[in-house]
Amino acid sequence: MGRGRIIIIIVLFSLIGASAWLLYGGEEQSGRGRFGRGAVTVGVEAIGLRTFSDIVEALGTANARESITLSSPVSEIVREVHFDDGQIVKRGDILVTLVSEEENAQLREAQANVLEARQQYIRTKELVDRGNASGATLDTQQRRVDEVQSRLEALQARMADRLIRAPFDGVLGLRQISAGSLISPTTEITTLDDIDSINLDFAVPERFVATLGVGQSVTATVEAYPGRMFEGTVKSIDSRIDPATRSVIVRAEVPNNDHAIKPGMLMEVEVVSRVWQGLSLPEEAVIPTGGENFVFVVENGTSVRKKVELGLRRPGYVEVLSGVNEGDRVVTEGTLRLGRQGIKVRVLGETDEQQPSASRGN
């Protein structure tokens, strides 16, 4: 073996020894000097209560609380259109006036007939009272009054058909007709939607039916408004399960005062079906091993490995059902260095006086 090769080997062994001392020796000396032989610095967090909830996720469709397509009850020519696209209207507002000259003439004639029949009835009654006419004649005149009155009411109803009104408060859609056009009962005039609140319908798998109930809270999001949450409550649950999809339709009512939600929008829905208080652990404290879960609890300056039973998981934390108690301090940082029971630990961020007596140097 050459002299140069021997020198290289010596240098390599020296470097390895120095690295080992820096990694283990320095840390051990630091631990001995302040916190006792072999103490490991760890981060901890106290176990506390947290609110948990079962959340059912689904996709739903927004529908107007009330929605119709307006049309005319008769075939007639449009005299005047009284609305614009997207206009907000109140119940009873006149939207369209149809031509009605013939009906107006018939109405005036019917009103005159009613007036004449009533006057004739009064004269006949006076004659009956004086004994100059029979009661049968008065009855005949009464039937005449009733007949012309019925005809007048029928004409008034026909006249009302010439005025197309809003049946409820809402927002109109696009106008599909113009003045002078001939429309019929099959002609679409416009749409009318009541969207001050939205009916949000969504399908939920039948296995969740037992957890659903009227009044439960609902949150929904829509792609058009990133980051915005729409809140509502469950209004009703369908009485039947769809045998094809094995799901039930749930309807929630969502306030929509600014009309941001439009009928037909696809919405992502979350229903809070159950809420409770439970012990929680940070996710990083859990050590899965062989199909079981463990945590390290700091007790009197040493780490104690405990088996835990976990429940519901949420981002960043998990429900713990058994194995630890409220107030226990579990290790969240440094768990990989606690390979066995009884390792002395120093809690990160605590002073010497705050450390448990078992973790201080002798």
Image (cartoon, rainbow, N blue to C red):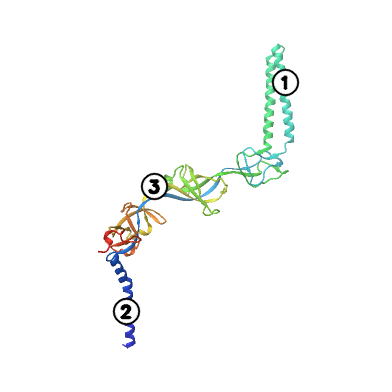
Is 186 above or below relative to 46? above
What SS does tag 2 mark?
Answer: helix
Q: Residues within 10 Å of mark 3 (few under 14, many from 20)?
A: few
Taking the image as drawn, is residue 204 in sight?
Answer: yes
Q: CA separation, marks 1 and 2?
A: 132 Å
- Identify residue type, mark 1: Gln
Determine which residue is flagged by label 2: 14
Q: Residue at x 67, y 30 (%)?
A: 154
- Identify residue type, mark 3: Trp
Is 90 above or below relative to 31? above
Is 32 above or below relative to 54? below
Q: Percent position (x, y) of residue 92?
A: 63, 37
Quadrant assignment, res 177: top right
What quarter of the picture does the N terminus occupy?
Answer: bottom left
What SS does tag 3 mark?
Answer: strand
Determine which residue is flagged by label 1: 119
Taking the image as drawn, is residue 205 in sight?
Answer: no
Contact between labelled residues 3 and 2, with CB atoms less than 8 Å apart: no
Of labels 3 and 1, earlier in sequence is 1
Q: CA separation, marks 2 and 3?
A: 61 Å
Q: As drawn, which residue projects farthest toward the front? A: 353
Q: Percent position (x, y) of residue 199?
A: 53, 45
Q: Percent position (x, y) of residue 144?
A: 70, 22
Numbered circles on residues, count:
3
Most foreground residue, 201 or 271: 271
Q: Percent position (x, y) of residue 148?
A: 70, 26
